[in-house]
Every structure is written in C-alpha cells, then in structure tokens.
Image: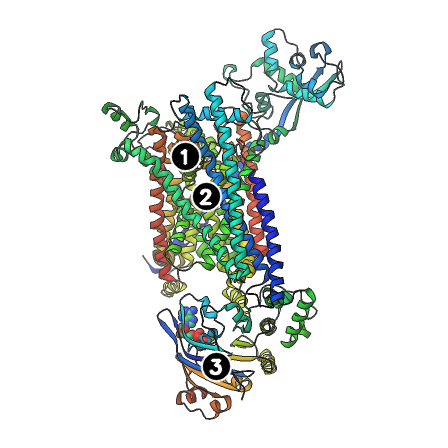
Amino acid sequence: MNEIKIKSKNLNVYYGEKQALFDVNLDLNEKEVTALIGPSGCGKSTFIRCINRMNDVIDICKVSGNIEIDGVEINDKNLDVVSLRERVGMVFQKPNPFPKSIYDNISYGPKIHGKGETKSELDEIVENSLKKAALWEEVKDRLDEPGTGLSGGQQQRLCIARAISVNPEVILMDEPCSALDPIATAKIEELIDELKKTYTIVIVTHSMAQAVRVSQKTGFFHLGKLIEVGKTEKIFKNPDNKMTQDYITGRFG
Amino acid sequence: MNFVLIFLITIFSLSLFFYGRSKTKSISVEKNIKLNALPKFYGYYLVLWCSIPSLVFLLIWTLFEPVIIKSIIIETAANQGAIFNDKNEANLIYEKIKAIYAGTYFGDIDTILKESALSYAKFINLFTNSKIVLIFGIVIASVIYSLKKIKNNNKARDDVEVILKGLLFASSLIAILTTLGIIFSLLFESIKFFSVINIFDYLFGTNWSPQRAFVRDASAITAEEYEELKDAFGFIPLIAGTSFIAFIAMLVAVPVGLFSGIYMAEYASLKVRRISKPIIEILAGIPTVVYGFFAALTVGPFFRQIGENLGLTVSSESALAAGLIMGIMIIPYVSSLSDDVINSVPQSLRDGSYAVGATKSETIKKVVIPAALPGIIGSVLLAVSRAIGETMIVVMAAGLAANLTINPLESTTTITTQIVMILVGDQEFDSPKTQSAFALGLTLFIATLVLNYIAQRAVKKYREKYD
Amino acid sequence: MTKEERLKKRHSAEKRFRFYGLASIFLALLFVLILVHNIFSKGSSAFMKTAINVEVFFDQELLEIKNGASDDEILEADFFDITIESLIKVYPAKNVEEEDALIELFTTDAEIEIKRAFLENNNLIGKKINLEITASDDIDQLHKGNYPRDIPEDRRRISDFQLVIYDNLVENQKIVKNFNNYFFKNGDSRDPELAGIGGALIGSFYSIIICLLLAFPVAVLASIYLEEFAPKNKITDFIEININNLAAVPSIVYGLLALQILLATIQLPRSTPLVAGITLALMTLPRIIIPCRASLKAVPPSIREGALAVGASKFQSVFHHVVPLALPGTLSGTIIGLAQALGETAPLILIGMVAFVVDIPSTPIDPSSSLPVQVYLWSESAERGFVEKTSATIMMLLSFLIVMNFLAVYLRQKFEKRWN
Ligand SMILES: Nc1ncnc2c1ncn2[C@@H]1O[C@H](COP(=O)(O)OP(=O)(O)O)[C@@H](O)[C@H]1O
Ligand SMILES: [Mg+2]
C-alpha cells in the first residue's frame, strides 16, 4: 500500500444556497490511480476541482473543511493557488488546447513558472512531455501547427502533455475520455497506466469498465455524499453498500 | 518640460526594471531562498511604483496649473488697478500678459501689464520648480517604499496584479465619471437658468425666441423684464416640433423597418439575408451630416417644386423633408432589432400555428408578432430616442423659427437645432440665452434616458420570457 | 364564401404580405442608391478645376527684380501689375469695365499663381510664357455645365460680355480642365475655386488619432475588468448601466459636456483637434466597450480553465490567452466606433470647429475644422461652387468610412476564431 498523498476531511461545498458536497472524507494514495464514479450531478467534478482549487474561479462556490496534500492544508487563504496548481495538474472533459501551436501549448506552463530559461531547456521539456503523453511520434514534425488542428484523442493527449509539462505531483482527470472514440480511449488508458508510476492520478469516469481497467482505488459518490470507497476490485466485486451495488449493476445512474 | 519629465520617469522606471530583476535573482542565488515570484515581476513592481504615482501627479498638475495661474494673475492685475467689466476683458488682459511673457506682444505696455507680466513670470517659475521638486520627491518616496518591499521578498506577482487590477477598475470608472461630467455640466448652467426663469414658465411657455432675450443685469431683473424674458423661453414649441418631426420619421421607419425585419427573419434565404442586412445597416453608418445635406439641398427643394406644381406653399425647410430623411436614417435601428427579436421567438410557437393549417403570414401576424411585441415596442422606443436626439438633419433641413404648427409643409424647429443655434459661434457667458441651451440639453438628456430605460426594460423582459 | 375562395384569398394575402417585406427592403436599398448617386453626380466634378491658358510677360520694369533674384526678393516683389496686364490681354477689352469683367474670370489668387511659376524658374524676366491660371468659380461652374446660361442676365452672376469671352476662349481651346490639387491641399476659403479640405483632413486625422489613443486602451481595460474581474455587486451593476446609457446619449450632449468641462473649466484651446479628440473619445468609449465585452465573452471558459490548471494566475490566463483571442473582435469594434466618430458633427460644432480656418493645422492644438464640419459649413454657403465641393467632401468622408468598415469586417472574418 502506497502512502497517502491527499486527504480530505469533512469537505463541504456550496454553490450559493445549494450544497454540492456533504462531509466528504477521502484519502488518495501516492502513485496510484483513484477512480471516482457516480451518477451525473453527484459532485465528482466538484470534488476534484477542490484539489487544485479550481472552484475559486466560481464566484458563488464556497468550500469548507480540509484538504491536505502531503500533510499541508490547501484550503488556506494564504496559500498561493498558482503554485498549488503547479503541483496539481488537471485534464478536462472536453480537450481544451489553447488555439496556439503545439509547441506553445506545452511550453506555456514552464515559461510562466520560470522553468526552462533557455530555448534548449524548453525544447527538452516539450519533447519529454510529449513523449510521456505518447504523442511525440505523431507530432514531432509539426510542432508549429495549431494544437486545435489535432484529432480529439490527440488533443486530449496534448492536454495531458500540457499538464505534465510543469512536472506536477498529482494529475486530476475529469472524464478525460468522454469525448473520445474507443481507440483514442484505449490509448489514454494505456497512458494513464504508464503515468501512475510517476504521478498520483485522480480520474472521474462514467464508465465502470474504465474504472476497473485503470484504477487501484474507487470512490462512489451519490447526491454529494461519498457513499463508499475502497480497493477497486472490492468495490466492483462485493461492495458493502446496497446503493453502490445498484449503481455498478446498472440499476440506476 | 513635461516631455522631459515623462522621458526621465520612463528611463528611470526602465532601469529600475532591470535592477529589480537582477537584484532579486542574485539575492535568491546568494541566500539560497525560493523567490515568491519570478524575478521579472519584481522588476514590474518597481516600474509600476516608480511611474504611476508620479505620472498621475503630473497629469493632475498639468490640468490645473494654467487655471490656477490664470486666476492668480487676473487677481493681481486687478489689485494693481486693472479694470475689466466681464470675463472676456479679463481673458483678453490675461492673453496680453502671456504674450508679453512669451515675447510676442507688440502693443503698448503700461505699468499694470508690466507688473502683471513680471508676476506671471514669477509664478510660472515657482510652479515649474515646485512641480519638479514634488515629482522627484514622489518618485524617490515610492521607489524607496517599493525597494524595501522587494527586499523582503514580497509576493511581487500578486502585488503587481493588485496594482494592475486597480488600473483596470479605474478605467471602468471613466464611464461613471463621464456620466457625472454630463450631469454636472448640464446642471451647472441649468440651475443658473432656472434661477432666472421659473421652471414652469419654461415647461409650459408657448413662445421660444431666445434671440430676443436681453438682460442688462441678471442679478436684478424687473417684473416687466421678466415677463418679456419668460416669453422668450417657452419650451412647448420645441417639444412640439421635435415630437412632430420624430413622428413623421417613425411613420417612415416603423413600417419599412418592421417589414424589412420580418422579411429578413422569416422569409429571406440565408444568402439574401447575408447581403441585405449589411446594406440596410449602411443607412445607420452614413454620417447624419450627409443626410442633412441631402435633405436640405435635394429633398427640400424637390418637395417645394412638387408643392408649387400642386399649388401648395411648401417651405424649403419643411418638417416633412427633415422627418422623411430622418425616418430613412432610422430604418436599420428598427429592422435590426426587430429582426433579432423575431428570431428569438421559439420555433415551437410557429410549429403550433402551422400545425393547425395557418399560412406563414397568418402565423407571423397572429403568433410571432404578438409574441415579439414587447421587444418590437422596445426597438421602436430606442428608435424614437435616436430621433429626438438627432441633430444635424434637423439643423440643416428643419428650420430655425419656433412655429407651433402641425402642417408638415411648414418649417419647425427642434430642441437640438436650438442648442446648436444658441451655442454656435461666440457665446455670451452668463446670459440666460446661453444657459437655456444647457437647460435644453438637460431636458433632452432626461427624455432619452427615460425612453431608453423603458425600452431596455421591455426588451429585457421579453428576452427573459424566451431564454 | 366557398372554401376555395377563402383559400385563394388567404394565399393572396400571404403573397401581399411577402411583397410588403420585399418592397421595404428594396425601398431601403433604393434609397442608398439614390443618395450615393446624388452625391457622386454632384461631387465628382470637384476633383477637376477649370483653368485658362494665359500668356504672361515678365516685364522687368513692372516687376522691378532681376533674373536670378533670390526667393525672398521674389516673395517681396509686386506681381500685381504684370498679373493684370496678362489677364486683360486674354480678350480685347474696350474700357475699364470690360477689363474688370475680364479679370473677374480668374481666381483672386491669379497673382500668387504667377508668382509661384516665377519662383520655380527665376530666369523668366523679359520672357513670355503660357500659364494655366485657375478660373473663377463662376467660369468653373459654367464650364462644368452646373450653371444655366439661359436665365436673364440680371439674375446671372456672369454677364453677357463674359459669356462672349468664355465662348471665344472655348473656341480657341484656351480653357482646360486640370486635376484640382487645391481641393486636397488648401484650407477653407471664401472663394470656392480655392477652397479645399486640406485643413479638414488634417483636423479629422488628428481628432481620430487622439480619440483612438484615449478610447481604445481605456475601453479595452474597462471591458477586461467588467468581463473578467468584476465581482457581481452593486458597483459593477452601476457601471454597466452607466455604459449602456452613455451609448444612447445623443452626441450633442457630449458637445455640451465638452463645452462646460474641457473649454470652460480646464480651458483647453477652442476649435482644436485636441478637444475634438477628447470629446469623441468620451462619446466612443461606451460604443467600443460593448463590442469589446462581447468578444471577450465569446472566448470559451475552457481556455481560461486550461491556463489556470497549469498554474497561470487569473491575470496571466486573461492576458496571455483570452485577450489575444478577443483582439480581432475588439479591434473591429474599435474601428467601427472610430468610423462613427469620424462622421460625428454636432459635438464638434459646439466646441467651435465651425470657425473659419484658412491655415492647415500643424499640431493638434491649432484651430481646425474636420471633414463633417466642413460639409456642414459649405452646405450653408450660397455659392454654387460649394455644392460640388460639399458633395466631393462627402465622397471623401464616405470612402474613408467604407475602407474602415471593410477593414473591420476583414479583421473579424480573417482572424476571429469561431468556437463550436
Ligand atoms: N458552477 C456551478 N454553479 C452552480 N451549481 C453547480 C455548478 N457546478 C456544479 N453545480 C451543481 O453541483 C452539483 C454537482 O455537480 P458536479 O460536481 O459537476 O457533478 P458531476 O461532475 O458528478 O456530474 C450539481 O447538482 C450541479 O448542479
Ligand atoms: Mg462532471
């Protein structure tokens, strides 16, 4: 069993009047893939967006409770979210490459964080990131072309490469394959398997099969509550909770 | 002088940028601490602190220096025995003093002028010197403050962003300042006007002829004088003329605009729409002075010709010509907005009507237009507010005399025309005539504001219904 | 009514309705055509001017200067006598009245034109050369066919005798049409043949540049604030309402604002492009902010999130990604706002740009006119020659507007990203 990397304690999230998460207590292990499942609107995205404080962007969103990364509280007002997000990268549901060249897409992060002072250092970061995202071979001859010209699956891997480029510790993925075809999905899953050697990964997914394939640990959310969490095999073979059972057997969701 | 100062501040700021950047870099290497921001942000931080306070100060100083010096000099000249009866004479003397100082004055110089010019020179020097000293003081103070901050490894990026955000906020405040400026400048003169002319005499008077308004002494107006004055400033003919011309304009703009809007929204193919919409919008892009020229030189005489042939007397500056042309100008305001509004009527409403066998025009008349009505009314009101604020067409084509008439073939005048007529050329300051232009401006401002408010409310309500 | 009749009636109502719509659009288009045709047919002749070929003899006795005289000496010299001598030789005149009638055929600047020819070549003393001297406005209009000659003499500005001379000159091919450089080069003048839009062009140029320099940055910064940073609160709402209202305030009210604040309070110089530029900037500001905000809004939030997720600060996500993407829309909105400002007349009249300015402004704080104000001024003049000048000025103004609008459309179509 790996060490605990991220720990949430009594996490409550509100959008204005509406409460979206209720007392979520969830531990995520280092260098492991944790899958979050549950019917839509149950708060999965809300939860992972707390880990890199993306919810700060939403005016009406209020977060209470604790999240610790390596034992350090991140809901602290004085914490610099920018350096937090340098450590916790994110990949979104719909690929969102910047409408710039492939090269600029990847080099943007390192540039703003002052990593890669020289062109050759940047080149190296771009190459490594693309290699780690298994995209290098496909795009190495056209780094100057716009990232938006790639296929959907390639765009998503570009976004993964972009997340990797600043050398984070954690990568959050919010339904990264929901906009992709099965072949592209398979590639990304392969990639996730590879990435977990280096990074702690949290993935939200709609596909139970995907959760089984890629994750070691699975959490099931329902109506803003974390219903059950445990080893993936256990959750899918014999869950403790009746609701989990119903969900994975497709009786609702 | 100001350019030199700006140049120096710029140079100094830029050098501070490089200083700040390299300094923090070396500190972080020497003391082996992690910086709270990239080194360049420390540079930006210094630049902002060095330049903004001093430049803002310089701007304010430059704006107010001439005004202050002028009032001081005019006062000293008066103390030395210069006599001026009104503002214009005072201005003239001040110009002379300035010319003497600049060495471009060739008239006789008496002692008063000489003394005043000397004190002018003294004050110019004093002001320039204090400006330089103060600016250096500000630059040094802010640089010391900011250097101290970066020594303590502050979060320079956050601080830079806070300052920039302040700048963004300040920019958006300019809109409020403009509104305040408008209200202030209109009220300032209007209040003076209404302290002479009773506001009810203004609002309900039926005679407008400000060129007849002479006041010997505004502070002591006799009862007879007032009777005459109030007879010169009656608003009724102006609002009548304005509404009349706007009404003629709407008679043209509403049917043509509305039918164009309906056709483009409901019938036109994508191709027709793509071509005709911009062409109709050209009408809104043509400067109004061009319409005015066309109305005055072509349409007016044309109508008179027709009138002559029919045995009618048509004034060459007729309400009809001005209203017609104004209506054409306004067509796109009606057509574009009603096109948008009709487009946002949900398709399901139309489908319901087709499903009971209605034709397209029946659907439009019975279902689409009633549904879109609040929005259409809103767009018509916006067009009305354009019409009453429109100036050049009426100045050039409608006439100057305030006739209370409903004969479209006669000339009438409008609020905007009168503002222009009163204020064009040299104005006498502090006369009710000049002030009346501001009172008219205030009336116009309030009227358009109210119309716009109602129109926007109507359109918004409508949008909320279907969004 | 039978069912068929009823149906037929409904269908013809349908056709009529459709026809009204189409007719309305055609009416609007027709008007654009009539207007443009009217202006062009009146104005295009202004780009040519009529000149009369005159033989000029540079008589040393009358001129009192020598060959090779310096420019200063030439400028000092009196060319009046040789001008008169040359002009009256165009046609044999019997008496002083007829000589005056002859001189009236030419522009009042004939002497200056002759002097200018001499300045170019100062070896002409004792020589005769042929010069094309600009004709007076009346001859110009007559020659262009804008002036009817069949009205009674006492209601004409050209006498019968002058008509005879004119016909004679035409017969001898002494009358020529040249490119009207005065129209572009000169400032305003009381004489239509000398009046030009040089001053107005420069005045408009300065005003628009100042307007751009002030309005564009402020509008962009304000839009960024309102669209990206402003918290949802009363102040923000208030600013928004303000901007929408300002966009609808009649332009003449901005003239009153400028009169009270810029001229009376801060005492900026009257009739100058500086004041015009500031006034137009205040007026254009809300009109630019609205399209700016729309193009910022059109950038999808996923771009912002993408930047934030790699650790860009909010500022960086906005200035590195959103603003560049919104730039084409912003620029095109700005250009359209400037085009409106370029055609704006009423506020400029109030700040004194209607002053009669002969000199071409060299700085933004010189008194000046502007293109639309020039149109207004000339349209008030009685001389026939000003009608074509006014129309030609409108042609220039409209061409600028067309170019600007095309640029705006081009920028948007070429560079604006469409999101799906
Ligand atoms: N920006 C928002 N504003 C208001 N409510 C939101 C917002 N985002 C999400 N919610 C609400 O929070 C709940 C959880 O949403 P989310 O975390 O997106 O669910 P999931 O990702 O599991 O589908 C939903 O009920 C949703 O309506
Ligand atoms: Mg989600």
User: Could you tell me which chain the residue with mark 3 belongs to?
Assistant: A
Q: Are marks 3 and 2 in contact (CB under 8 Å)?
A: no
Q: List the residue tagged with mark 2.
A: C283
Image position of A221 (left or right of C216) = left
Q: Are marks 1 and 3 in contact (CB under 8 Å)?
A: no
Amino acid at pointer 3? Leu
Q: Which of pointers 1 and 2 indicates the residue nearer the eye?
A: 2
Asked whether the residues under marks 1 and 2 belong to the same chain, the reply is no
Q: How many circles with numbers are drawn on the protein? A: 3
Label of residue C218 in the image: none
Q: List the residue tagged with mark 3.
A: A36
Cα–Cα span, label 1 and label 3: 70 Å
Judging depth in this view, the residue of C235 and C66 nearest the camera is C235
Cα–Cα span, label 1 and label 2: 21 Å
Asked whether the residues under marks 3 and 2 belong to the same chain, the reply is no
For numbered disc 2, what is the local secondary structure? helix
Quarter the C terminus of chain A occupies: bottom left
Q: Percent position (x, y) of residue A155?
A: 59, 71
Q: Percent position (x, y) of residue B131?
A: 51, 39
Q: Percent position (x, y) of residue A92?
A: 52, 72
Q: List the residue tagged with mark 1.
A: B394
